[in-house]
Image (cartoon, helix red, strand yellow):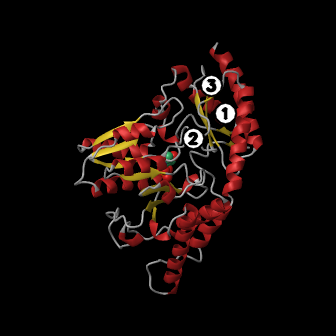
Amino acid sequence: MVHYLDNAATTPVRPEAIQAAVEAMGEGWGNPSARYAIGTQAAARVKSWRADVAGALGCAPEEVVFTSCGTESDNWAIQAAVELGKRKGKHIVTTAIEHAAVLEPCRALERLGYEVTYLQPDRQGNISVSDLEQALRPDTVLVSMMLVNNELGTVLPVAEAARAIKRSGCPALLHCDAVQGFLKVPFTPQKLGVDLLSLSGHKIHAPKGIGAMYIRKGLKLQPLIRGGGQEEGLRSGTEATAQIAAFAAACRLGAETLDQDLAHMADLNAYAQTRLKEAVPGLRVLTQGGAPHILPITMPGYKSEVVVRFLGDRGICVSSGSACHKGKPSHVYAALKLPKKEQDGVLRVSFSYDTEREDVDALAQGLKAAGEQLFTSLS
Ligand code: PLP
């Protein structure tokens, strides 16, 4: 039996999403651009799936463009924003705790002569709006701030950032990577005041290979992919109907049960904090009060990679940080400037609507055993 507690890395595809994909590949296989019935029917379905995603996000369907993943949306948002601002300046503000999908395009722009200010978090992973206010300049063309950090669960002050940009009078567009925030904290793009916002399907129980970008009405971007003119000419390529269908189903269902899912994850998070602290003396929770699905902990004196493997051998899945690190130390935990012992022992536990207390119990037992056996083997 597998106890899956790594939902910030990816989520199991929910049965309704699988069913929607199967139908789209089966009877719904037509090309949405074709003019005969099976084509126009496919186009009508894509239209209604777009409305489902927009409904869950709280925006107009015309403001949603489908992409292949969150990384693509982040890259596109950043490139498009600097293209729009190219006559106004070459300064970007982001945070030191963004995902690589934001940091790497920013680094590429630095190599092209852009200046990037990286806002640093405090020890709890919070980003300060007054730091942002100080960083904004008349030539700032983009602020990119994530909604929920993928390794800490902290919620960043995106709405306050939008107000600060307005007050400053600088021409910056505001992009938000909401990959970990979507269906985990309540928001709409309009309430946040963002211009561009990125989503990913596989974090919300849809398959991999589908994401979306919110583009505020009235904002005209350069196309990401030129070709047959799909997605209003912004991202050509025949629509990935099966993935879109599954994404829409996951959005619809996730939005329907949002309140109860958030309450369930918050309950599990609190339960896990108690159980895990009981199981391992010295275990510390790194951040409090963030999104309910992420619980970052540290076991000082233990190597998280070793603990993750120990748990994995027992069918318990957690992560030692972002799954994208591939063994490299996490830039997010490094930015918190934790003592080395704490940094080495960081684990990320993450929940979803289908995680149960018995998964947390299994983790508590696994960590207790890891604490005893790994300590024995080290001594
Ligand atoms: N942004 C954040 C905050 C993420 O957690 C992830 C995935 O881990 C991504 C972007 C990338 O999304 P995708 O895997 O869909 O490319």
> What residue occupies the far bottom of the structure in this picture?
36
Q: Dot 3: within a 10 Å radius of its alpha carbon, few (fewer than 14), some, or many (20 or more) residues?
A: many
Depth check, front residue: 229 or 337: 337
Q: Which residue is mark 1?
A: 311
Q: Is residue 39 above or below residue 63?
A: below
- Residue type of the residue flagged with mark 2: Gly
**Which residue is found at the position 22% from the left and 54% from the top?**
87
x, y percentage for residue 299? 62, 25
Mark positioned earlier in the residue sequence (3 or 2): 2
- Asked if one can make out residue 86 in the rendered structure from this viewpoint, the answer is yes
x, y percentage for residue 368? 73, 26
Q: Which residue is mark 3?
A: 299
Q: Dot 2: within a 10 Å radius of its alpha carbon, few (fewer than 14), some, or many (20 or more) residues?
A: many
Which mark's residue is nearer the viewer, 1 or 3? 3
Mark positioned earlier in the residue sequence (2 or 1): 2
Residue 153's tag is: 2
**Which residue is found at the position 58% from the left and 48% from the top?**
10
Q: CA distance from mark 2 to mark 1?
A: 22 Å
Q: CA distance from mark 3 to mark 2?
A: 18 Å
In what element is the residue under mark 1? Answer: helix
Looking at the rendered image, the quarter that the C terminus falls into is top right
- Residue type of the residue flagged with mark 1: Leu
Depth check, front residue: 59 or 251: 59
In what element is the residue under mark 3? Answer: loop
Q: Is residue 80 above or below residue 310?
A: below
Q: Answer with the quarter of the image where residue 281 lies.
A: top right
Tell me whether circle 2 and circle 1 mark residues in contact (CB < 8 Å). Answer: no
Depth check, front residue: 66 or 307: 66
Depth check, front residue: 223 or 135: 135
